[in-house]
Amino acid sequence: MTKISNYDEFNYDYRKYWEGRDYEDKAEKIVLKRYLSNYKGKFFLDIGGSFGRNLPAYSFINETPIILDYSLETLRKNKESILAKHPGTRLIAANAYHIPLKGNSLDGSLMVRTLHHIEEQERLFEEIRRVTKNKGLFILEYANKLHLKARIKWLLKLEFENFSTRPYQQPTKGHFEGVKDGEQAIFLNYHPRNITKLLQKNEFKILKSTNCSFFRINFLKKALPFPVLIALEKIFQKLLSWTNIAPSIVLKCEKIGEKKNETFESFEDILCCPGCKGNLELSKAYAKCKNCEKIFKQEDGIWDFRI
Ligand SMILES: C[S@@+](CC[C@H](N)C(=O)[O-])C[C@H]1O[C@@H](n2cnc3c(N)ncnc32)[C@H](O)[C@@H]1O
Ligand SMILES: [Zn+2]
């Protein structure tokens, strides 16, 4: 069975992870802002969206922003603050391998800092292809296994096998995201060629690629004032993205396809059974699959479509 990084299994507040990480947060927001500068859409999905850190980048330019996350607790805890700042956002607890949305229903989607928790990347990309409209947007951030520090370390240790295109499992020590202490976390870094291949196979054309978070090194973050770090980050993103030496890479992709897109009116119109993809019979509190008869609950405005 595919392992899932289940943040609900223990008391891990992901919001806390961001305390003291203003530089990384800003570095990512710079790229998102640039990628979304001329964008407007209707249904936009944040896959593994958690407490909505990235909402400011996409919420006001989309009619219906949707956060999907496996952690129902995270959605529950953050619902009020999300809706206070971004009214109209829809919240779905679901497994990204089984997205409860109809085929070709999304104008765009975003997945930041989530692919490192995904054991079966091929399956996930197939699912994202299925839900994305032709010519739809997909922004993907992933952890880059070829970042400068790793390259130097592996060369010094003569660990040449690590340069292969296979995902690299980061040592669990120090990572608590989605795992209990002492357990092996799913924490994968990827080779850019591997990601390109997976995207192309799933009909996504890469329009832009940006290296991000060049200065994710503690002594630099302490030594340089924040505005200087950010100014340098902007310059490095522009000049050095071709190198793939930064720890994080952000891609802007477009789904290729000639087929005409269907029009969906409301959020309820695009929901479907996450298992068999059948149509749903919807009421305020429940959704019943007309095909496999599975029942899903909506509580306090949050759908629970986890399977
Ligand atoms: C490191 S956090 C990133 C959150 C957010 N994207 C950000 O950049 O701030 C990863 C998130 O992915 C979610 N996640 C992990 N595996 C998932 C899966 N299979 N389906 C849905 N969400 C998943 C976790 O619950 C967690 O909230
Ligand atoms: Zn079903």
Image: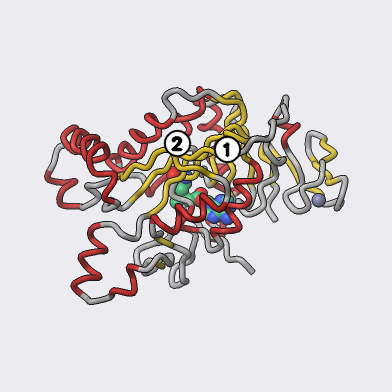
Q: Is 158 rendered above or below residue 186?
A: below
Q: Quadrant of residue 42?
A: top right
Q: Is 161 rendered above or below residue 219?
A: below
The type of residue carrying mark 2 is: Asn
Point out residue 225 in the picture as x, y percentages from the top left corner. Answer: 15, 37
Mark 2 surroundings within 10 Å by alpha-carbon count, few (fewer than 14), some (14 through 19), many (20 or more): some
The answer to which of 106 and 24 lies nearer the viewer is 106
Judged left or right of residue 232, residue 54 is right
Judged left or right of residue 96, residue 138 is left
Count of marks, rendered view: 2
The answer to which of 157 and 307 lies nearer the viewer is 157
Residue with the most extreme left position: 223
Residue with the most extreme front position: 258
Point out residue 32 in the picture as x, y percentages from the top left corner. Answer: 40, 34
* Res. 72 in view: yes
The colour mode here is secondary structure
N-term mark: 2 or 1: 1
Give the residue at x 31% y 53%.
Answer: 247
Dot 1 corresponds to which residue? 45
Mark 1 surroundings within 10 Å by alpha-carbon count, few (fewer than 14), some (14 through 19), many (20 or more): many
* Res. 13 in view: no
The type of residue carrying mark 1 is: Leu
Give the residue at x 43% y 62%.
Answer: 188
